[in-house]
Amino acid sequence: MKRKIYPMFFSVVLIICLVIGTLGNLMRYSGIAVLVVTLILFLMTYLFAGEVNRLSSKHVKWIVSIGLIAMFIGQIVILSVMPNTVYHDPYRVLSQADQMAAGHMTWGITYFWRYANNVPLAYFMSLWLKLTQLFHLSTNVAIHTLSLLVLDLFIVLSLRTIWQLSQRKSLLIGATAFFVLTPYAYTYYLQVFYSDLPSMLILLLIMRIIMQWPSKSPKKHLLTGIGLVFVSMLGMLLKSNIVVLVPALMILMFILWHKKLLKQSKLLLPTLLIIFGFGLSVPATHGIYQVSHFHTETKYEFPVSHWILMGANEQHKGMYSGNDVHRAILQPNKKVRQQYDLKEIPKRFEKLGVGGTLRLWVIKLGILLNVRDIQDWYNGGYRSAPTWYQQMAQPIRVIIILSYTAATIVLWFTLILRLLSWRPDFKNNQQVVAVLAIITSLGYLAFHTLLWEAETRYGQVILPLILFTLAAIPVPETERKRLFTKLRIVAVPSLITLCLVGLGFAIGLGHEHPKNTVIAAQRSQLSAQYQAKPFMLAPGKQMTEDVDLNGRANYFSAQVHAGSRIHVVLENRQTQQRYQMYRAGYVYRLHKTLQPGNYRIVMKNISQKNQAVDVTKTYHYQLSNHPLVMNEKKEKYASLVYTCLLRYKGGSTTNS
């Protein structure tokens, strides 16, 4: 058979997407620094590969094991010493799960009526919390344990898959370094439990099952098939965009049929099982609704067209649009919202024109593949980070950006080089599944680029597919020879150079472009927009909450409620100095230099009427380091909503 001259069409499209994603990550003030660190890191990995491949299997096992143990210790330290304040969607899901685990099957806010797709996630989390309550674990410990289990299982399974597919020591050590030495295992996926990480794990499991399917015996097919159906159903329940697997499988089967290899691939049965699993998610969803006492409300429900409308919003770059959401809320029901969307969507594309639409798609693709802000995803800041962190917050922030962005680009560029020289052998099952991973990756990117809204988190779902493809593609003979070129003399200095250059950029950029730092915060809340009920503070009564500031601050805000008027004071517990806070909308603010120490928020109703105050209260989830004192009673699982910052001139403030 004549060998193809050009790369596969889908490989070329993925290369273009990754190039756009790379350029998107090189924007903003740190672009040059990211580029320099990326080039040094790529050179270093290239030079080290030969030496790594010479290592014995025993040494490789030791390196991987020590790396994973060190990672696990680091994760425990971060969760113990630096708990963060989770806000927005993940908190609302966690709060509902905490409530259901306590036996209260009620839905007190409109959030789930608007976003019913998160009901199954809340239900499954409540089952986990019920299980851990048998061991007398708090919700905090239980949810951290769940994050650790899912995250570390994904990492270990990824490394195992990479080794099974490639048997390349350099790739295994490189992947270990990616997980252990970058923020991946220590920031968003560790600190915030949401549907993103389980979706990545499920994708990896599905790819592994399809890869191993032809080699299994008919007896094992039964158990494996049941597992594939269950995993597919679970994936659909947690995040429905996994449905892109179906067209990806159809495209792959068409290619195999055209090459007269469909029967040999044995792909038909697993495809049918995946589709069956997706189909089972419909009755499973209704079953979850029943056992959790949830019912839909068209008065609040958003139609699918709402997200398509936001995806075509040029002003917001196809991302979440508060204006579109507010306009949808004003509509009386789901049907009217859909009618409005279907009229408005063609108008937006007509206004954009062909050129504007293509430009918007490129921008959205760059957003999807932007990994720079992994630390900030759904993270409202640490509750009260230790002093050493506050002192080094700016360089650490830049190090997180540089390390994860550079490592991701190196991963992409390595894959791009493989794809340029790879000509798939469709008789090889491993390479067939690699093609499936590529097409599925493109499906995810196309879904959010061409159709849906875009967020930086959404593009991360292709990470397991990228790793799988990189491991499954054979190394070209020319590159394999170069990998074993002995360049130890240059490799070690390159590592030292990488560390020094990265540290230099971190200190320099952290000083030149400081970002407002959260000194202490409790930002978890159910939000008034979802009709969360505030606490009514009676006349003459007060509530207090202590806050630890481990660093110098110059801004403090405490959320009250729209239209409420109360007396709010921030008191220094050591000096007894009191600072009167002033009203600004629904919060009370203070612009004053605050030295490290223990402070107390005092809210007192000096009026003759009840005043509403936004209080976040859970059943077993501790929100802050100190309890909220209401009516002289300590509430361990209740807290005010507050934020303390060290603000810099020109720095952005993401909160009130």
Image (cartoon, helix red, strand yellow):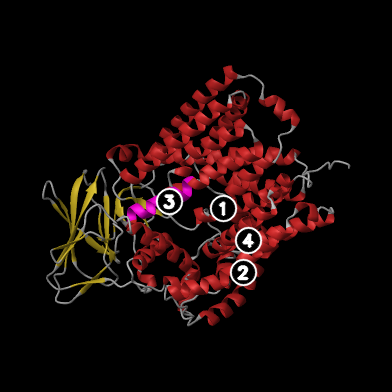
| Pointer 3 with pointer 4, Cβ within 8 A | no
Location of mark 2 (residue): 279
Report helix, strand or loop for mark 3. helix
Badge 2 amino acid? Gly
Question: How far is disc 3 from disc 2 in space, using C-alphas?
Answer: 28 Å
Depth check, mark 3 against mark 2: the one in front is 2
Q: Which residues are magenta?
A: 140-152
Q: Is the C terminus in the top left, top right, bottom left or bottom right quadrant? A: bottom left
Q: How many C-alpha atoms fall within 10 Å of the one at disc 4: few (<14), some, or many (≥20)?
A: some
**Is residue 592 placed above or below 99 in the rendered structure?**
above
Q: Is residue 564 left or right of residue 444?
A: left
**Is residue 551 placed above or below 283 in the rendered structure?**
above
**Is residue 401 placed above or below 623 in the rendered structure?**
above
Q: How many C-alpha atoms fall within 10 Å of the one at disc 2: few (<14), some, or many (≥20)?
A: some
Q: Is residue 283 visible?
A: yes
Residue 142 location (% of width, % of height):
36, 54
Q: Is the N terminus in the top left, top right, bottom left or bottom right quadrant? A: top right
Location of mark 3 (residue): 147
Question: How far is disc 2 from disc 4 in space, using C-alphas?
Answer: 20 Å
Location of mark 4 (residue): 447
Depth check, mark 2 against mark 4: the one in front is 2
Is 145 contained in the magenta span?
yes
Going from the N terminus, do you reach mark 2 or mark 1 first?
Answer: 2
